Image: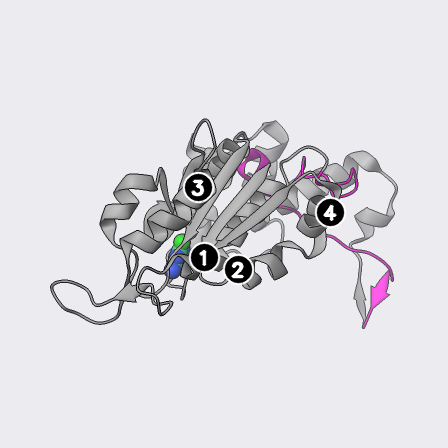
Amino acid sequence: MNFYVMTLFPEMIENGMNTSITGRAIAKGLLSLTTVNIRDYSVTGNGRIDDYPYGGGAGMVMQAEPVYRAYQALVENRKSSPRLVYLTPQGKVFDQAMAEELAREEDLIFLCGHYEGIDERVLEEIATDFVSIGDYVLTGGELPAMVMMDSIARMVPGVLSNQESGQFESFQGSLLEYPQYSRPEEWRGKKVPPVLLSGHHGNVDRWRRDQSILRTLRNRPELLSGAEFDKKDRKYLRALLQDEQEERLTEEEKGFLAKLLAF
Ligand code: 6GU
């Protein structure tokens, strides 16, 4: 997988991506990272790449031409143009399905904006995808680009070790992960749930499944409507609803459960 990033802050991207698991993957040659500093393609001679917005209003707009020239420098001498993702809060919201789809590409270009955005005309020319990472505002597209690259990179074969392998993580099967514990058995008076020390794999699996369901109900109830429940799951859901689990559910959580069990 080859990542290309067009940005005003290439060192931010390089420092982030050359760290930890993505850094190891780059060193191994499983990933490559090329950054292009849009400022190097300023057309005014003084390194400026922004100007006032037509129509007035606050802030500055990144000009079309420096962005276009940076893009041309990236794609010249190539047979086909890779997909180009423009990071913008106005984009489609990134999720695991989009990460999986993008991970099938050989090359991806990310375009990071700043200020009030980029002149629309160059976006019409070069962007194939408009992506946001969620409903909050950031100062630029660099962190979103790194979020996307991190989640895409971990699906590239060889990037994760067997230990780190992501086969059984959150969003597989649309339930959240169960809680994890390690040594010591008791930490500041808090004990590890006894079932995990029992050595009974069936009971451990059941407990973990129940905890996944409970967590999803508490933190992301809307995900439950996309989950599939078998007989034993439904038994746990009923026990929760009838307060047999001492989990003290809110009325709202119980309402969600009642609707789930009605199906
Ligand atoms: Cl992609 N960019 C910016 N500036 N803010 C964001 C975002 C992107 N996604 C969420 N907030």
Dot 3 alpha-carbon crowd within 10 angstroms: few under 14, some 14 to 19, many 20 or more: some
Secondary structure under the numbered disc 2 in the rendered image: helix
The quadrant of the picture occupied by the N terminus is top right
> Which label was assigned to residue 243?
none
Whole-percent x, y for residue 73 in the image? 44, 45
- Mark 3 or mark 1: whose residue is earlier in sequence: 1
Whole-percent x, y for residue 258 in the image? 44, 41
Q: Nearer the viewer, residue 48 or 128?
A: 48
The boundaries of the magenta stretch are 159-188
Residue 58 in the figure: left or right of residue 17: left
Q: CA distance from mark 2 to mark 1?
A: 6 Å
Hey, what amino acid is under mark 1? Thr
Whole-percent x, y for residue 240 in the image? 56, 46
Question: Ligand 1 closer than 8 Å to the CB at disc 3?
Answer: no
What residue is disc 4 on?
27
> Which label was assigned to residue 10?
2
Q: CA distance from mark 3 to mark 4?
A: 51 Å
- Mark 3 or mark 4: whose residue is earlier in sequence: 4
Q: Residue at x 81, y 73 (%)?
A: 188
What residue is disc 3 on?
258
What residue is disc 1 on?
7
Magenta span contains residue 218: no
Counting every numbered tag in the picture gives 4
Q: Main secondary structure of the magenta part?
A: loop
Dot 1 alpha-carbon crowd within 10 angstroms: few under 14, some 14 to 19, many 20 or more: many
